[in-house]
Image: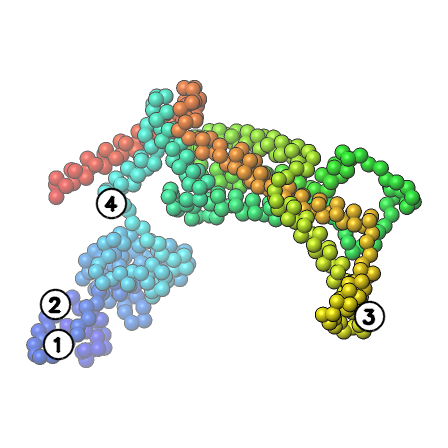
Amino acid sequence: MNIRGHTEQSDGILFAPDALRIEISGPTGLHLSVVDLPGLISVTNDEQSEEDVDAVYDMASNDMANQGIIKLARKHDPDGQRTVGIITKPDLINEGAQHRIALVAKNEDSIKLKLGFFLLKNPSPLELEDAKEKDLQALGSARPSVDHVRTFLTGLSMKFFQLMDAALRGNYDSVNPDFFSNNNFCRLRARTQELNTAFATEMRLHGQKRKIDTLSPPSNSDDEATDETTQLIVSGAEMLQWVKESQGWIGIAQNHIDSILKVVLQWVEHATKNVILEDHLRCEVSKVLANTLEEAKESATAELDRLLRDERQSPMTYNHYYTDNVQKARLDEQKAAVRSAIALVTQEDHHGRLHISNHADDIERFITAIQSRITFDMDESACKEALTQLEAYYKKVAMKTFVDNVARQVIERHIMSPLPEAFGPRSVSSLSNEELWRIGSEPQAQSVRRSKLQTEVEDLSKSILDLQAVF
């Protein structure tokens, strides 16, 4: 066979076309390795000559790894700087050669190209037919008449209605779970709860425009009388208006409405992209939804104005929480006064160490000493009482009631509740024929594409049947 390394001649060949038959018998089995030569020997290197490559090429069948184009490319581009490797028919790779082809495809084999290798596989007739049918299904049913358009829009609106209903209820696993799992802002109920909570926090921290500073010393204002004997006279309505102006509820509530509308609009944009694939139809439906949101904003703002008008009326509550807080504040004030008096008595009368016996005279002297240390200022007491009642009503009762009313009566009633019907089966049924045709008629380009796809699917089906009949 004159194989190099197994003959005395130095110019022997590396590969021979001769058939070698080996018979092995005995109790011990030997492990044999079968090497796919065309997959290993395709170009020259330090160990294999041009004649070796030609010999293997002549012996090989039409294997994917044995393409002479490698030799041609190496001839015109020795360094592999300008060559792009294209590996075709990857589904027809010989059994056992997958690993080698994978290395070639990743540019990790002995043949390396600067621009790398790419796999190219053409679809089979069945795959082509499936792809065309999927494209045809994506276009939906043909809509040549108004009745077809109405049926099509009714089905489409039902999908949007179910998606919106699931978003508002927070049932993210009931309809299209992939949509709700892609982004957090798709979870509309969760985002609304977050904004409502942030609104309540903002009201609690910044709902008062003016706050009482108990640490700073009193200062004279330029626009108020500086003479202590001058009496400041205001009417009851003016005093009530001052109290109302001390609460910056309007701006906070309006900002909250705007934030909710922004989140809803963002959700609607993603939902329409998910449900409606046609650009023209999506644009028309988006206009309908935009009008609904604009109307929702107007009605929500009007409802907020009504709530604020109610708050501008005289304070009124039957909530026991108000009286409980007033009583608690009074008790806290009394405890503070008694605690301060006891501290003075302990320091001044008992040298810092208080001890009282159970004798009635000692107890009476102790009580008398406390009474002498407690001072009562009518003006200060009246001011504290007014502040106590204001805080108990506005911060503990009215503000919390206002926050709840904004969440229920403004956000839920006027923004969230109308959303499912904005583009639902009921709203579609109320559209006129002209509106139906304007919104849901099929574009001419799409109709032409549909006809072309139908023809291609029919031709492919016929071709497959003809091939099956031959083979």
Query: Tag 3's secondary structure?
Result: helix
Left or right position of 227 against 264: right
431 over 300 or under it: above or below: above
- Residue with the mark numbered 4: 124
164 over 43 or under it: above or below: above
The tag on residue 376 is: none
Type of amino acid at the residue the image marks with label 4: Ser
| Quarter of the figure with residue 313 | top right
Left or right position of 415 against 212: left
* Outermost residue toward the front in this view: 360
Q: Position of residue 145 (x, y in %)?
A: 34, 21
| Quarter of the figure with residue 66 | bottom left
Q: Earlier in the sequence, mark 1 or mark 4?
A: 1
Callout count: 4
**Residue 127 visible in rendering:** yes
- Residue with the mark numbered 3: 349
Of residues 28 and 373, the one drawn nearer to the viewer in this rendering: 373
Near mark 2 (Cα within 10 A), the count class, few <14, some 14-19 or many ≥20, is few
| Quarter of the figure with residue 2 | bottom left
| Distance from the alpha carbon under mark 3 to that under mark 2 | 124 Å
Type of amino acid at the residue the image marks with label 2: Ala
Answer yes or no: do the residues labelled 3 and 2 have beta carbons within 8 Å?
Answer: no
| Distance from the alpha carbon under mark 4 to that under mark 3 | 106 Å
